[in-house]
Amino acid sequence: MDHLIEKTLSRKTIFEGKIIDLHVDDVELPNGKMSKREIIKHPGAVAIIAITDEGKILMVRQYRKAMERVMVEIPAGKLEKGEEPIVTARRELEEETGYICETLKPLISFYTSPGFADELVHLYVAEKLSKKENAAPLDEDEFVDLLEVSLEEALGLLEEKQIYDAKTAYAVQYLQLQQVLGK
Amino acid sequence: MDHLIEKTLSRKTIFEGKIIDLHVDDVELPNGKMSKREIIKHPGAVAIIAITDEGKILMVRQYRKAMERVMVEIPAGKLEKGEEPIVTARRELEEETGYICETLKPLISFYTSPGFADELVHLYVAEKLSKKENAAPLDEDEFVDLLEVSLEEALGLLEEKQIYDAKTAYAVQYLQLQQVLGK
């Protein structure tokens, strides 16, 4: 694969933030020419497809500053330093929904924006849910509404572009596939 | 939804690049407290699920600097200024694969990383493909290998984490769903 690989010649760190860092790399292309790559470093995240005993999917409605709008998504959150993704998944499910789960299985992991960022999202399926008394609170800068929706309602939210992000679209399609397969 | 909305108090532009811009916004949270939001602005992108008459899916193998590795993805590319996404989709399909298509239908659009970026990806399904003589060339800093894979092979590439990004994972699951539905 050497005919594809870019060599890093130097890296300039533009920004080191609370959530993301930004670097600009000078690279040597496979043909020997030079170029620049704008790179966002992100700690990674988890997202949880949580299904209640009644077959409803847990979703959270929240304001997303990057789009300046409210969106409906599956519960998700970023990894704390050194945290195992499955631990993050349990924590975020409890904080964002007040639910805990008996079973939590990894489904798939994927990079969200490989063209410019290294954010890796780990998707889990949570079942056997129960409401927890005195659940862990949200981060102090997080505000969410909890929704419990059927697959049909989720498809309606997709159609209306209230659900409008990759991980939640993937989750809804996963549930469609499971339904068609009779699982 | 006023109980969720964050008000922008001020915006600091940290970086304006070739592909992304970075801003840090000071916001007032719904409870009146202050916080900061790190925001990446991106022009948006398209991705194409292109199916040959033999039922193979077109994929491109390319080096992704953010992850420092080679990945296999469906053809994709970012919008040029003022370009309609469907025009970008035709252009990127031709540039990255050498194929043109007779039918090109919008499937879904989604934000890839709503926690920190406004990148919106428009996904299309392309069919009735044909190889074009003297197809438009790749951008001068792009190097890709073209693959034509069956759904079974795509599932293998996912398992091996050669396919490892959200839009391509969504595309493979879409094709699985279509197969199960007998379409």
Image (cartoon, coloured by chain):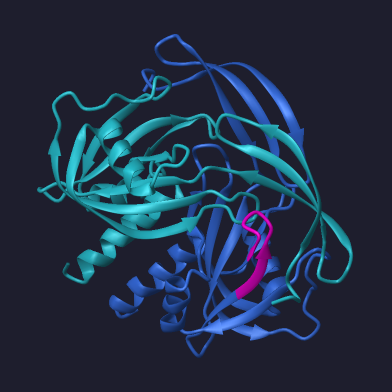
Chain colours: A cyan, B blue
Q: Measured along the vertical axis of the image, is residue B96 above or below residue B54?
A: above
Q: Residue furthest top?
A: B32
Residue A182 in picture, x, y percent from top left: 16, 69
Q: Which residues are magenta?
A: B60-69
Q: Residue furthest front?
A: A82
In magenta segment, residue A61 = no
Left-right relation of A6 to B183: right
Q: Main secondary structure of the magenta part?
A: strand
Q: Is residue A45 visible?
A: yes
Residue A20 in picture, x, y percent from top left: 59, 37
Q: Residue furthest bottom?
A: B54
Left-right relation of B102 to A63: right
Q: Residue furthest right?
A: A33
Q: For this rendering, which residue is in front, A13 or A62?
A: A13
| Residue depicted at x 33% and y 25% | A138
Q: How many marks?
A: 0
Quadrant that contains the C terminus of chain B:
bottom left
| Residue depicted at x 80% and y 73% | B137
| Residue depicted at x 78% and y 70% | B138
Q: Measured along the vertical axis of the image, is residue A111 above or below residue B41?
A: below
Residue B140 in picture, x, y percent from top left: 84, 65
Q: Quadrant of residue B135?
A: bottom right
Residue B76 in picture, x, y percent from top left: 62, 63
Q: For this rendering, which residue is in front, A128 or B168?
A: A128
Quadrant that contains the N terminus of chain B:
top left
Q: Is residue A74 visible?
A: no
Q: Quadrant of residue A77?
A: top left
